[in-house]
Amino acid sequence: MELLEALRAALGDTAVMSGNEIEPRHLGDWNVKVSPADGPIAVAYPRTTEQVAAVMRECHARGVGVVPQGGLTGLAGGATPNPGCIALSLSRMRVIEEIDPAASTITVQAGVTMQAIQEAADAAGLLFPLDIGSRGSCVIGGNVSTNAGGVRVLRYGMTRELVRGLEVVLADGTVLTMLNKMQKNNAGYDLKHLFIGAEGTLGVITRVVLRLFPKPANVCTAFLELPNYAAVLDFLGRVRANLGGTLSAFEVLWPEFYPYATTALGKPGPLPATRAMNVLIEAMGTDQSRDEAQFTALIETAMDAGLVSDAVIAQSGRQTQEIWDIRDSVAEFARVFGPAASFDISVPTSRMQEFVGIARAGLDRIDPGVPAMWFGHIADSNMHVNVSLRDGGPGLAAINAVVYGVVRDFGGSVSAEHGIGLLKKAYLGYSRTPEEMVVMRGLKAMFDPKGILNAGKIY
Ligand code: ZN
């Protein structure tokens, strides 16, 4: 095929795989996969920005679709190939180019894993705070394209807040170099923000300048039991007031969560199982003795006030890991929970319990007693919900209608951090106005008039 010959000429024979050579992993992300018949005609593996630009130029000239792929750990189908497309894998663009201590930045190619960036920062005595469960496989280009969140957003922000500069290849092969390192730069529109969270529909991210932070000297972690959501909110207020800038995680698990994470999965668990709320709290500071005293006093005061009914403060690295294992057991839930509809929605923090009550009642109407799990980064207004897709149940569409319907009524977001991809397209209008959708489509038409770049994603 003439396009493949052109791509091989630009990238080299070993950088373009077609037919039976295509590895199955390129057929989808963690949630949305297609059959080989509906997959890409070839996967291209550029190593440089110039090669990405060449792939885009060749495909643009022929009107052939391109789907950018990173670590393929997404959950919404944003990197799932379209039939007959070229999958553009950034996985060979793995160079960490520079750490600049004075600017406190790191510059990397798009295919570097999150964990490799964390380790490079650590080796330089600095912190790259972005962290999610797939850290070893996900790559920064995908993290930026989906504006990934995670558990430390309340302190360091979403990926968007961590990006200082970007390099992007547009649909026609034009390279936009915006590798800014400076905190202050008000010279006209800050175009990089258009590509952050755009899920590869406006351009292909090839290089990123990221912010680094001072490395905390110590970490305090605790796992708590609280009687109800009102106590959780009261406690969050106290934590913010007393720990100030050191609070780095505040993860809330509704009562259904803990028995699955411990009894069902066979993990010991730091506390006895009850029908209460659990909170995982973490603070990262620079003064060990002062930070630990402050952390312990905060929890003791909350216990005296009746806000916290039981608590374990980690005394060792092993205990810290045991606490995080409870939260991270989400990745293993499929084993005991079975197939599930999973949601990453946002609703106002103050109304989350109300949201759970209304959504729970709605689910009971279509499938009485259906197992559902509620947990989230409530300080960021972000809640995750897993609802069992059990045999004989009403199915995904009916569950979506209930949960997203309540999100819409609450003025919330149908995607807090995973993106829209293919899975949530039908619900984008629940969280965006028709006027916003017109502007989004206008931007898409300007950046990609032929509609070749990740077509059919988001809207
Ligand atoms: Zn999350």
Image (cartoon, grey):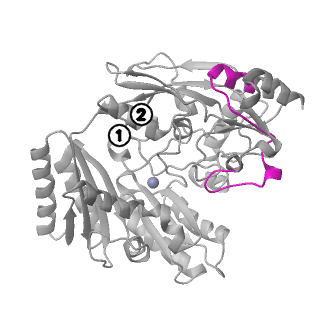
> Which residue sits at x=79%, y=40%?
85
Report the span colored magenta: 28-55
From the viewer's perspective, tell me whether residue 434 is left or right of residue 303.
right
Q: For mark 1, what is the residue?
A: 156
Q: Which of the 4 image quadrants contains residue 84? A: top right
Please rate how many residues cluster around mark 2, counting C-alpha atoms within 10 Å: few if below 14, some from 14 to 19, many from 20. Answer: many
Could you say where residue 433 lies in the image, as x and y percent from the top left? 60, 47
Residue 28 lies, with reference to residue 273, above or below; the image says above
Is disc 2 in contact with disc 1, using a CB cutoff of under 8 Å? yes
Please rate how many residues cluster around mark 1, counting C-alpha atoms within 10 Å: few if below 14, some from 14 to 19, many from 20. Answer: some
Residue 319 lies, with reference to residue 62, above or below; the image says below
The amino acid beneath tag 2 is Leu
Residue 302 lies, with reference to residue 189, above or below; the image says below
Could you say where residue 176 lies in the image, as x and y percent from the top left? 60, 20
Report the number of discs. Answer: 2
| Closer to us: 318 or 428 | 318
Q: Which of the two discs, 2 and 1, labels the residue nearer the N terminus?
A: 1
Secondary structure state at the residue bearing disc 1: helix
Q: Which of the 4 image quadrants contains residue 79? A: top right
Q: Indicate which disc residue 162 carries.
A: 2
Task: Residue 84: tell me if it is visible.
Answer: no
- Report ligand 1 position as a quadrant: bottom left
Could you say where residue 416 lies in the image, as x and y percent from the top left? 49, 51
